[in-house]
Image: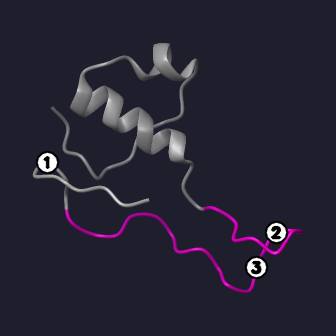
């Protein structure tokens, strides 16, 4: 996932996927749940309730500063 914008703290977040530890179909195993990234954008940038939009709590990431 690639996120751009002035409020974004620069850097790479999360652990990189292993090229040798693949799932049964030969695909990379993800290390960051995209729903936590989406929840962070909703809560901190768009001012929406991620729990209402996503129907649950998926944590948050630290690529956006706290409001």
x 54%, y 34%: residue? 58
According to the picture, the residue beneath numbered tag 2 turns out to be 23
Depicted 43 relative to depicted 59: above or below:
above
Residue 16 percent location from the top left of the image: 53, 75
Q: Mark 1 vs mark 3: which is more N-terminal?
A: 1
60 in magenta: no
Tell me how far mark 2 sits from mark 1, CA to CA.
34 Å
Quadrant assignment, res 9: bottom left
Q: Secondary structure at mark 2?
A: loop
Main secondary structure along the magenta-highlighted residues: loop
Residue 57 percent location from the top left of the image: 54, 26
x 19%, y 44%: residue? 65
Residue 16: which numbered mark, if any?
A: none
Q: Secondary structure at mark 3?
A: loop
- The span shown in magenta is 10-30
How dense is the environment of label 3, judged by Cα within 10 Å: few (below 14), some, or many (20 and up)? few
Q: How many marks?
A: 3
x 20%, y 37%: residue? 66
Depicted 3 relative to depicted 38: above or below:
below
Residue 21: which numbered mark, if any?
A: 3
The residue sitting at the top extreme is 52
According to the picture, the residue beneath numbered tag 1 turns out to be 7
How dense is the environment of label 2, judged by Cα within 10 Å: few (below 14), some, or many (20 and up)? few
Tell me how far mark 1 sits from mark 3, CA to CA.
34 Å
Tell me how far mark 3 sits from mark 2, CA to CA.
7 Å
Q: Which sits in the foreground, 4 or 33?
A: 4
The answer to whether residue 55 is left or right of residue 62 is: right
Q: Quadrant of the N terminus?
A: bottom left
């Amino acid at each position: 996932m690639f996120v751009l914008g002035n409020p974004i703290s620069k850097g790479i977040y999360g652990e990189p996927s292993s090229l040798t530890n693949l799932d049964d179909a030969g695909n990379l195993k993800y290390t960051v749940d995209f729903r936590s990234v989406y929840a962070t954008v909703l809560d901190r940038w768009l001012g929406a309730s991620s729990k209402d939009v996503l129907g649950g709590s998926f944590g948050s990431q630290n690529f956006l500063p706290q409001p």
